[in-house]
Amino acid sequence: MKKFTVHQGAAAPLRRTDVDTDQIIPVRFCASTTRDGHADALFADWRDDPEFVLSKPEHRAATVLIAGSDFGTGSSREYAVWALQDYGFRAVIAPRYGDIFRANSLMNGLVTVVLPVTDVEWLWELTEADPAAAVTVDLELLEVRAGGRTFPFTLDPEIRHRILHGIDPIGATLLHEEDIARYEAARRPALPVTG
Amino acid sequence: MGSTLAQKIWASHVVRKGDAGDDLLYIDLQLLHEVNTPQAFDRLRAAGRTVRRPDLTLGTEDHNTPTIDIRRRIEDPEGRRQAELMRANCAEFGIPLHRLGDPGQGIVHVIAPELGLTRPGMTIVCCDSHTTTLGAFGALAFGIGASQVEHVLATQTLPMRPMKDLSVTVDGRLPAGVTAKDLVLALIAEIGTAGGQGHIVEYRGEAIAALSMEARMTLCNMSVEAGSRAGLIAPDQITFDYLADRPGMPAGDAWEEELAHWRTLRSDDDAVFDKEVVLDASALSPYVSWGTNPGQSVPLDGRVPAPGDFAGEASRAAAERALAYMDLRPGTAMRDIAVDTVFLGSCTNGRIEDLRAAAGVLRGRKVADGIHMLIVPGSARVRRQAEEEGLDRIFAQAGADFRAGAGCSMCAALNEDRLAPGQRAASTNNRNFEGRQGKGSRTHIVSPQVAAATAVAGRLAAPGDL
Ligand code: SF4
């Protein structure tokens, strides 16, 4: 889990909806067995299109991605999150996400902010007009700041706490080992086992 | 106020209520395949942790596996490495694994039911979004990412926040020739690819009660394409009959006890859903996709839509992109779309019933010249059963390419089966995303019946057209 408190950086406006995880990282790059080294695979099938936002020199160094609705739908591949992080993205802003992608991103400390469509459109215009415009994602104050405006957002308090402090969720669960053992002892005996 | 089925299953798996409204849920079964898992095992080892319940965990090899000759080693070195790591990791932690060549091997969502491991009321997870398939048994089954896989390996639990409930009631009966695949495509076209987001969808009504277990699996499989995390169907006599024939079922009094328990697993009459959708099955006809997400589907009787047919700038822009990618012109009759390849298989439609349906269409007919029809069984067991029933001979006579090995094949395009750039397929899988079946590939999602008829006609067709 990457710790995250406040991040400020340039943003890439990705004016597309329904960017599924097959687009974020095509499956042929998911044969790798490591968590890192996926930067070049990010949006691999779009990267040679000069019109694609990350092909434009002025957006190449972006660390915040601003996308349309339903970003990260489809496959559960966590590679999508790792590729975004390897490329350098620390946060994504979109009106809506695929459920599994969102859970994966927050497990890895990639902050996925939900803002209304109109705010996302405003941020698209801002960052298209001024690619160097600083966009701040503040997890402590739960707000995005850019172009003199402030956009509040919400996040599950438990998840926010974990990301702010870089807490390992497995370690946190294992503190309740006794509860798990007690539950296990009371399970229905006929439940199947695999071997 | 009563409870929904999803709420009942959820409540019976809460190990501990969190302070911030999240629950620690016990997981009855974790399924693994060779993609999406090596990283979980690496971190588990690095943290000095172990697998808490290898006996509630099962692995299979499906995504990378060759299908032409199962003795052939996986050509792609990285794919081979994934399979090797899967074997090493399962051996190290004592997790049973169905390797390629085992009689129980196959696509993870196909073999788990065959092995009798998916039963009503269970919680089931897998590193794969189509785990929703298993909700057909009245189990709460959902896909998770690699970090959550690691969490379940180490603790057999998952912290989760309760999800909302969506009820999809399908009244009436499906007309002859209309399948669960058509039903789910019509549903997604109606509610959109985000229609079920944040929800567990429960399918109910007369049309659902009439579906076989296999058709129910097809329906629940594509729940994730409607954006939902899980799909559910309350267990009934059809479920119990399917389970009675599976290995490892309790016998005698223990079976009766399970039955009595399973019968309680239904939404109460006064349960309240967050959202409700009602469909009329009798009004449906075969559906096919035209675009690059499963919501971009129309009846086979219909035409390719124009961007202007859609409300909202985003939908119009998406339609324009999809038309360009699919190289289709608005107004073209769906039946005029010619394909190069037909793929019958995947966790959506790679079960015996799907192969039977296709064989019914192919019997006494020939696959059209220049069309490659690839049939890949969802599991080794499906392959054996098809042989026992003589389906392999029907496929051979028709000139279809019925593969020896089971796996994801051209659905994942990770093994040797993939489309070349610009090639067009009628495919029984679940996703028509850009590049899904190979870079630059074009996919039309169809039912097994439409797939078989399309193979014969050379263009999108229903059996009635032949
Ligand atoms: S058949 Fe396709 S959708 Fe199903 S598990 Fe395999 S790759 Fe995923």
Image: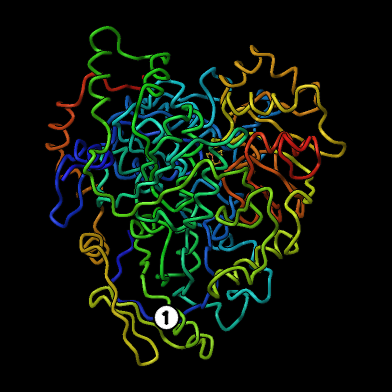
* Vertical placement of residue B443 versus B458, above or below: below
Q: Where residue B459 appears, x then y in whole percent?
A: 78, 44
Q: Nearer the viewer, residue B196 or B127?
A: B196
Q: Nearer the viewer, residue B28 or B141?
A: B141
Q: Residue at x 44, y 75 (%)?
A: A64
Asked if residue A84 lies left or right of residue B296, the reply is left
Q: Is mark 1 within 8 Å of ligand 1?
A: no
Ligand 1 found in image quarter? top right
Circle 1: element type: helix
Q: Nearer the viewer, residue A89 or B3?
A: B3
Q: What amino acid does circle 1 point to?
A: Thr
Q: Position of residue B224 (x, y in %)?
A: 45, 48
Q: Is residue B68 above or below residue B180?
A: above
Apparent side of residue B147 relative to residue B215 in the rendered image (left or right): left
Name the residue at 21% across, 64% down.
Answer: A157
Residue B105 screen position, x and y as percent: 53, 24
Chain letter for mark 1, please.
Answer: A
Q: Position of residue B302 (x, y in %)?
A: 68, 53
Question: Which residue is outermost to the right?
Answer: B369
Quarter of the view holding residue B327:
bottom right
* Quadrant of res B65: top right
Please name the colour scheme applied to the rendered image.
rainbow
Residue at the extreme top: B252
Q: Which residue is mark 1?
A: A118
